[in-house]
Structures are given as C-alpha cells and as structure tokens.
Amino acid sequence: MHPASQNPLQDLPKNSRQDWSERLTALAGAISDADDGAHDINHLHRVWQAARILLDEYPAANALVVQAACYLHDLVNLPKDDPQRHLASRQAAQLARRHLQQLDFPAGQLDAVAHAIEAHSFSAGIAPTTIEAQIVQDADRLDALGAVGLARMFYTAGRMGSLLAHADDARATHRALDDRRYALDHIACKLETLPATMQTDAGRRLGEQRVQWLRDFRTRFLAEWESA
C-alpha cells in the first residue's frame, strides 16, 4: 500500500466525479505503490487493458466492476517472501470497499468488486465465482507472462536478493527448483503453470502465447549461461 496521503481522495480532480474511468485511475494513481516497479500504476493500466481484451469475449460481464477491481487489486501488496502474503488480497478488498464507498460507487456492486480483488491472488487460493472475478484474475496473471512478465520477474527477484540462476545446474536437473534463490527457476516453478489456471478461454489462449515466449527465452538463456 502506498504510504502517502492519509486521505488520497482529497487529491482527486473535481471533474473526475463525472467519469468513473477518471475517478478510478486517479484513485489508483494516488495510492498505488510507486516504489515497486512491478506493481505500480503501469501494472494496473496493463491489467485493465488485458481485462478489456477479455471483456470483448464476455459482454455479459460488468465492465465497471472489472475496471474497479483491476485498478484497486494491489492496494495491499506484500512482498513475495512475506509470511502474510496470502492475506494481502483480503486486506486490499476491504480497503478498496472503503475507498469506493467514499466515491459513492454503486453500493450494489461493492461485493462483486471485493470478491474479484480477493480472488485475483495466486497465493490467496480463493476461487473466483463470478465472470468479473475470473476476468480480473486472468488479466492479472497475463501481466506475469510474456516480455513484461519476464522483466517483472527479474525485477522482483532483484528486490528479494535472488541470484539469476544456479551456477552449476541452472536446468535443475539434479536439484529441486527454488525460485526464492534463483530467478530463472520461477519460470518452471510458477509462470509455466499459469495458462492452465486461467478461468476464461480467452485468457488461456493469450496465456499460452505469452508463456511460449518465456520458454523460448529460457532456452536461449540456458544456452548462453552454460557456454560461459
């Protein structure tokens, strides 16, 4: 959670009250964590853009619920090695509800936004039971794949003090994978598994395309690493 203003709503532009897209992006910009390049406002924009692609195939979904959850899903974002990380999405949902209430967000849609935020997290293990929550979860996971996902992976690994790869067994042929110690292991440990967890057909298709890019990168990385 961004440590800035105690009341970020006071900085919202006055005309934002006429447009929910403006209001949500202004709110997210005011309270997103600018110090975490993997979970900053640009991540929120990308998740919403991915969600818009998915929404094209699911027109029955409530786009406002999806947009609100996309922009507020990381209000509480604990480090990957924090023992309380699995609780972060629940805390984010509670905080999002309070902020949206102050913005006079439609009361009948607050529960749907909160559920989508709670269920987006991989570590929380909460099943998304609505199409809106499924879209938000898929959109967030799509941003962990492909070229941007790769950059986010190494950025996060650097913040955690991880090594790039195991010096003598980067393929993990004779050892267990350990993505806390070795950044490259995260592709096999988690990222390659994400397409199979996608809730929507559109999400799975996009996920497979992006994960293939990661597989190709890993192959190239190993060739260079092992020839050094």
Image (tube, rainbow, N blue to C red):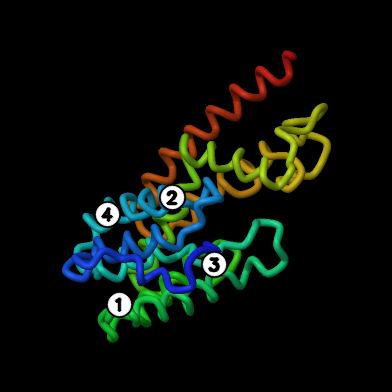
- Say what secondary structure mark 4 lies in: helix
Q: Nearer the viewer, mark 1 or mark 4?
A: 1
Query: Closest to the observer: 11 or 158?
Result: 11
Instruction: Specify which label sits upstream in the sequence, 1 or 2.
Output: 2
- Say what secondary structure mark 2 lies in: helix
Q: CA distance from mark 1 to mark 2?
A: 23 Å
In the rendered structure, find residue 204 and report the number of the disc placed on it: none
Q: Which residue is identified by label 4?
A: 52
Labelled pair 3, 2 in contact (Cβ < 8 Å): no
Q: Nearer the viewer, mark 3 or mark 4?
A: 3
Labelled pair 3, 4 in contact (Cβ < 8 Å): no
Residue 213: give x, y in percent of width and height: 48, 32
Q: Nearer the viewer, mark 2 or mark 4?
A: 2
Q: Quadrant of the C terminus?
A: top right
Labelled pair 1, 4 in contact (Cβ < 8 Å): no
Q: Which residue is identified by label 3?
A: 76
Dot 3, how many residues are within 10 Å of its Cα: few (below 14), some (14-19), or many (20+)? many
Instruction: Specify which label sits upstream in the sequence, 2 or 4.
Output: 2
Q: Amino acid at mark 2?
A: His
Q: Quadrant of residue 125?
A: bottom right
Q: Nearer the viewer, mark 1 or mark 2?
A: 1
Q: Amino acid at mark 1?
A: Leu
Q: Which residue is identified by label 1?
A: 103
Q: Which residue is identified by label 2?
A: 43
